[in-house]
Each structure stands twice: as structure tokens, then as C-alpha cells.
Amino acid sequence: MDETYLWPEADQKTSRFGSPQSEIADTYPNRASVPRDVWISLLLGTMKQIDVLVFSGTFFAQTNPHIARMLQERAQAGVRVRLCFGDPTGEAVRIRGHEEGIGDSLAAKIRASLTYYRTLVGHPGCEIRLHDTTLYNSIFRYDDHLLVNPHIWGQPASANPLFQLRRTANAEWFDRYDESFEAVWTTARLWAPDNADSKEYRRSGQD
């Protein structure tokens, strides 16, 4: 990382993203171009919360086979871990699969992705939910760092741009995306591995 990225207040010179107090820390032409080290360093550096909002998020586990263990370790260190995936039985996933031209494959990808996180179910500090909302962006929050992956119609998320935000004193972008995560999270249902595909599920906060 550049010194001005880690300590923006230490250098008041203008960067290629404008003021060092700018929310935009970096941009990438597509999610696939984000270095793996960026994901790992953000995860390991988190001290308070990790929030993930995706449809399948397959890459999240496939590029890091130790993701579940690492999330457990962060939770044991006091980090709140919240993962929110698309409901494979929901209408939003069906529509998205149709738009991408992959049909039921998206639902299958979600089910496959969820298998990586079975050990997190019931683990203190970790919670997994399934949402049935139109997803305009995939969101990955690590404390005061936020990676936003906008969705372009008909294209997989991996092929779409990604920009990295950092929380600042006037963090309007950061706060808006954070609020959107919370809005989806409150409507999502708890995921239980044994009945993930059942319509008879527990709503969040209910039996």
C-alpha cells in the first residue's frame, strides 16, 4: 500500500484521486483484477466488522481456501462477521440468472458457495443470511474500508468494475453503501445448512 493510503493525514498533497481525504482509495477495471493480497490484508486487518453482500460470491472462497477458518479467527478476536448471499430459491436469483444467460446455474453456484461456510453456522460472532433482493452492487466491508462491485446488466460481477472506498469525515458514499447493506440484511433470512432450500425457514429474529 502507498503511504498516503495508510496514513492520508500525513500528506496533504493532491493524489491521482484528488484530495487525500477523498473516499475513493482505488479503482479497478473489473473485480478479477483486484490483487488477492488486497482481499487478504483487508480481512486480516479488520478489528470490528466484516460485512459481505453478494449473490454467490464464489470467488471469495475459491481464491482463498482458508476463508472460513480466517473468518472464524477474526470472530474469535471480537470481529462481527455477517455474510449475506442470494437466496437460491428466490425470485431475484432466478431473474439474475436469466439476465446473465446462465439460467439455474446461479442458484447452483450459490449452493456450492455456501458449503464453504458451514462451519461458521452457530459460531459466536458469525451469521449467514440469504436475501431475495435486486442486487445492484456486491459489497465487501472491512471496518472503515469498503469495496463496491457495481453490477452491469447481463454481465457476471467478476467482469464489472470495482472501487475501493475508505471512511472519511464526510463519507457520504461509504455511509450510503453501508446503509444499503443494513437494509438488505434486515430483510434477509437466516441460513441453516440442513434446510437451505426449504420454503419453511426462519425469518431473522423469528422461529
Image (spheres, rainbow, N blue to C red):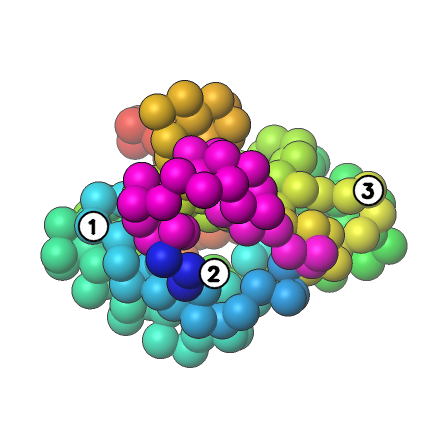
Badge nearest the viewer, 2 or 1: 1
The answer to whether the residues at label 1 and label 3 have Cβ atoms under 8 Å apart is no
**Label 2 or label 1, whichever comes before in sequence order:** 1
Which residue, given by chain and number where applicable, does mark 1 sit on? 47
Mark 1: few/some/many CA within 10 Å (<14, 14-19, 20+): some
Answer with left or right where residue 192 lies relative to residue 95.
left
Other residues around mark 2 within 10 Å, as few (<14) / some (14–19) / many (≥20):
some
Q: Taking the image as drawn, is residue 108 in sight?
A: no
Q: CA distance from mark 2 to mark 3?
A: 24 Å
* Residue 152 coordinates in the image, percent (x, y): 78, 43
Mark 2 sits on what residue?
114
| Residue under numbered circle 3 | 153
Q: Nearer the viewer, mark 2 or mark 3?
A: 3
- Residue shown at 71% from the left, 43% from the top: 151
Residue pictured at 39% horizontal, 39% vertical: 12
The amino acid marked with disc number 2 is Leu
- Tell which of 81 and 124 is nearer to you: 81
Name the spot of residue 48 as percent of width and height, x first.
22, 44
Which residue occupies 61% across, 32% down? 133
Q: Which residues are magenta?
A: 4-30
Say if 161 sits above or below 14 in the image: below
What amino acid type is highlighted by mark number 1?
A: Met
